[in-house]
Image (spheres, grey):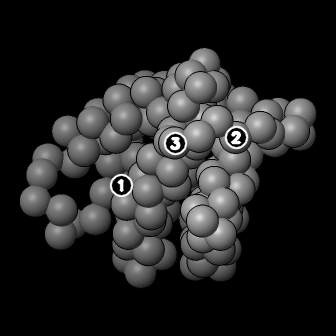
Amino acid sequence: MENINTSKTQNFFRILLGIFMVTAAIGHFTFQRADFQAQVPNWIPMNKDLVVILSGIVEIALGLSLIFLTKYKVKVGIALAIFYVLVFPGNIAQYLNGTSAFGLDTDQARLMRLFFQPVLIVLTLWSTGAITYFRRLKKA
């Protein structure tokens, strides 16, 4: 993968996303653990606490990588976007089951959150230069 130059604005949002991911990971292990467990769909054939711990480990790794592994920012951005897609069923399950977590205690609030995930994916791909990378691939 080639090195993609990104603007100061893109770098700002990349670092902000990294901080967001590290903060979310800390929540997985501490003060938001129950909220994250409540979001794990019942059809996942694993212990909910284990899912929360494993996803927290992935989040901290991706968050720190976004901040510090700038040479690999495109790869990390793609990996994080895939991660956001993989955890999206948890958001859908929270909405469909009417599960209150993270202060989302109404159907409207849970529904609004569903529309935030695609924005997060696009922001991740843009801020890491992955969109530019995909455009260059398409032209080649």
Mark 1 surroundings within 10 Å by alpha-carbon count, few (fewer than 14), some (14 through 19), many (20 or more)? many
Look at the image and tell me in which quarter the C terminus lies: bottom right
Task: Tell me the residue that label 2 is attached to.
Answer: 4
How far apart, in angstroms, are the residues tagged by discs 3 and 1? 38 Å
Image label count: 3
Q: Residue shown at 27%/36% (left/top)?
A: 54
x, y percentage for residue 109?
Answer: 65, 71
Identify the image quadrant of residue 22. top right
In this rendering, the answer to whether 65 lies above or below 137 is above
Residue contact between numbered discs 1 and 2, judged by CB atoms under 8 Å: no
x, y percentage for residue 134?
Answer: 60, 61
Q: Residue shown at 80%/39% (left/top)?
A: 6
- For mark 1, give the secondary structure: helix
Identify the image quadrant of residue 11. top right
Residue 38 is marked as 1
Residue type beneath disc 1? Ala
Residue type beneath disc 2? Ile
Task: Tell me the residue that label 3 is attached to.
Answer: 1
Earlier-in-chain disc, 1 versus 2: 2
Residue type beneath disc 3? Met
Q: Nearer the viewer, mark 1 or mark 2?
A: 2
Q: Nearer the viewer, mark 3 or mark 1?
A: 3
- For mark 2, give the secondary structure: loop
Give whichever of 97, 22 is nearer the camera: 22
Mark 2 surroundings within 10 Å by alpha-carbon count, few (fewer than 14), some (14 through 19), many (20 or more)? some
